[in-house]
Amino acid sequence: MTSNKRRRLLALCASFGLASCAKQESTAPKSPGAGLSMRPYGDRSPFEKTLRGARESTKSIGVGSSRTPLHELYGTITPSSLHFERHHAGVPVIDPAQHRLLIHGMVDAPVSFSMEDLRRLPSITRPYFIECSGNGGGELAGNAGADASRSHGLLSNSEWTGIKLSTLLSAAKMQSGASWVIAEGADACRMARSIPITKAMDDALVVYAQNGEAIRPEQGYPLRLLLPGWEGNASIKWLHRLHVASEPAMSNQETAHYTDLHPTGKATIFSFEMEASSVITRPSGSQKLAGSGFHEISGLAWSGRGKVAKVEVSTDGGKIWQAAVLDEPVMTKAVVRFRMPWQWDGQATVISSRCIDETGYVQPTRDQILADRGPSSNYHYNGIKSWRVEADGSVKNV
């Protein structure tokens, strides 16, 4: 490196408050055999912390969930192996050669599709998030997650490939008066949810691939319903039956569970849409800043209503909000990463983010949600998440 180039590099480091840059040396192997040999399946560098086992899991017999370690990831796409999971009766092992999707009920032409049939149909690939409606529920009750995984880890974002549900329903020739589709999975509990025809004929997909490969067993292999922007429980996994009907099934999972309780004791049902939300992932809980000076604040934002229009960040406990930069492209009902430069003065403070979507909806505070629903509602919590940065650089939940 020439002396002029080195001086420019040192000046750049100083402008960001970084330590002096040491002399750069090449780390390339001296011969082809000095590095890693070619492998049939790529893995992480030995210098990178493995994320195997990074999903925090809770389970009992046949029921469980695993959270995505959002604070460990970059970009917006969740690796398939780290996608959050939630199942109510274990994960079935299904031979795709034997699996079929039946469409019946209020249709003139009941039809049964094999996986080979489905893969022959026109396909579509789109990035969408899936979020459990219980994501962040502990925050409302005052049990703040210690890190982004425990506060918001029931959220993942993938590239999905499949067929538009409207294509399949059109092939079955729905009858007049059909207004609901009851989707059922092939797991032990036959998980079922009622889907309005308007959603089914809009952007709903029946997917068989995720991030360029077949969906994983925990995500519904070999076939899953995907309802962009709606609560994850309604995107039925191991999909094997679609019953077209004139009314909803009023199943256990849409009456006793996945409802929004209000202080009056009444509950709202079929509140499918996930509202605008966001979380800062760097710096966030359980991380530690190396010292005062320049740091990039980065996080994730999403909305089931459509595109994220704006994300604002506060570094002083919510007194002043500044617009963050959104990484392009911003896709509808998909996670977007936001970033904002921050010159930290080394003093203890609180950092927060809030999302505004294209409909004008503004992510609310926890107090606003409490005033509307009270403290006993476990679903659809999307309150503003804050992290406290201590003077020693450690970051904790608020």
Image (cartoon, helix red, strand yellow):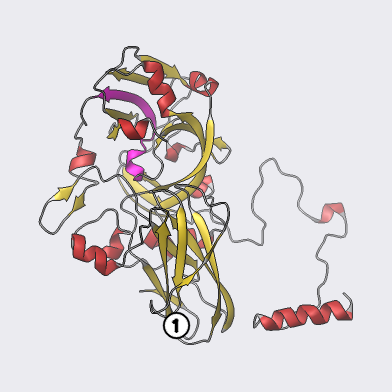
Q: Residue at x 44, y 24 (%)?
A: 167
> Is 219 positioned to the left or the right of 345 in the image?
left
The quadrant of the rendering that contains the N terminus is bottom right
Asked whether residue 98 is drawn in magenta, I would say no
Q: Position of residue 223 (x, y in %)?
A: 44, 30
Q: Above or below — where is 284 with respect to 219? A: below
Q: Position of residue 355 (x, y in %)?
A: 41, 61
Q: Residue at x 24, y 56 (%)?
A: 378
**Which residue is tagged 1?**
390
Viewer-nearest residue: 190 or 300: 300
The quadrant of the rendering that contains the C terminus is bottom left
Viewer-nearest residue: 132 or 5: 5
Q: Amino acid at mark 1?
A: Glu
Visible residue check, residue 283: yes
> Is 218 positioned to the left or the right of 371 in the image?
right
Q: Residue at x 45, y 55 (%)?
A: 308
Asked whether residue 244 is drawn in magenta, I would say yes
- Secondary-structure class at tag 1: loop
Q: Mark 1: few, some, or many residues within 10 Å (few <14, many ≥20)?
A: some
Q: Above or below — where is 315 with respect to 246? A: below
Task: Please tell me in which quadrant of the rendered image residue 147 appears.
Answer: bottom left
> Is 188 positioned to the left or the right of 97 in the image?
left
Q: Residue at x 32, y 50 (%)?
A: 133
- Which span is picked out in magenta? 231-245
Visible residue check, residue 87: no
Q: Position of residue 51 (x, y in %)?
A: 54, 56
